[in-house]
Image (cartoon, rainbow, N blue to C red):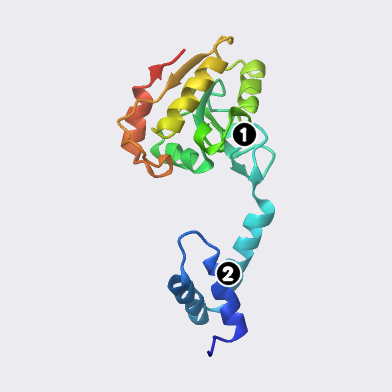
Amino acid sequence: MIKYPSSLQNLIECFKKLPGVGERTAERYALSFLSLDEDSINIFAQSMKDVNVKIRRCNKCNNYSEDELCEVCKDKSRDQKTICVVEEPKSIISFERAGAFQGVYHVLDGLISPSDGINPDDINLSSLVKRIENDQIEEVIIAVRPCAEGEITAMYIAKKLEPYQVKVTKIAYGIPLGADMGYMDPLTLEISLENRQKLS
Ligand SMILES: [Zn+2]
């Protein structure tokens, strides 16, 4: 069987590593590189390297960052005493697009899921508790996906923070069940935030 020349075949194999990209899509992507000019290709290659080398997690909130602290944590004009707890960094981008939240964030990197063997120790909860202890936090708003794991996680956080002088709320769910928080429209997010409910 005749294959593509090896450089082209290698590129196809690279694209196949991406989520949702099968053989045919990978082939289409790789072939499209043949018509890009050299500058575009250099920028593309450099961007991929930069992401690998420069992107780390914020020391405070676990958001994506190129420095020790992310842009949100660095911003003194934000309300540093209100923390919005999210499942993953892309939820932060959703909230920022909506422009409805002026506080700071905390990224859990997952939800508690006993059936999948994901325990409280497997997500970034201890660093959240540390922030409550050290940073005089007044309110924690839980904004995770509306699903069984999200509910368990919210209840666990509320219980865990009971001993502290901090209000714990959960955003209201006009958000459809099972929705991906990373792709919520701004208005839905804003309303969900405004109508948040007190947990403890
Ligand atoms: Zn941060």
Q: Name which residue lies at 54% across and 31% down.
A: 105
Q: Amino acid at mark 2?
A: Cys
**What label sits on residue 101 in the rendered view?**
none
Residue 28: percent from the left, percent from the top?
45, 75
Q: State yes or no: Cβ of the residue under disc 2 lies below 8 Å from any atom of ligand 1.
A: no
- Using the image, determine if residue 107 lies above or below residue 155: below
Q: Is residue 2 above or below residue 9?
A: below
Q: Position of residue 44 (x, y in %)?
A: 57, 67
Residue 193 screen position, x and y as percent: 38, 27
Q: Which residue is mark 2?
A: 14
Q: Amino acid at mark 1?
A: Asp
Q: How many angstroms separate mark 2 from mark 1 (CA)?
A: 30 Å
Location of ligand 1 given as a quarter of the image = top right
Asked where in the image residue 119 lies, by quadrant, the reply is top right
The answer to whether any part of residue 106 appears in the image is: yes
Which residue sits at x=53%, y=90%? 2
The residue where tag 1 is placed is 122
Q: Secondary structure at mark 2?
A: helix
Q: Are marks 2 and 1 in contact (CB under 8 Å)?
A: no
In the image as oriented, which residue stretches furthest toward the bottom?
2
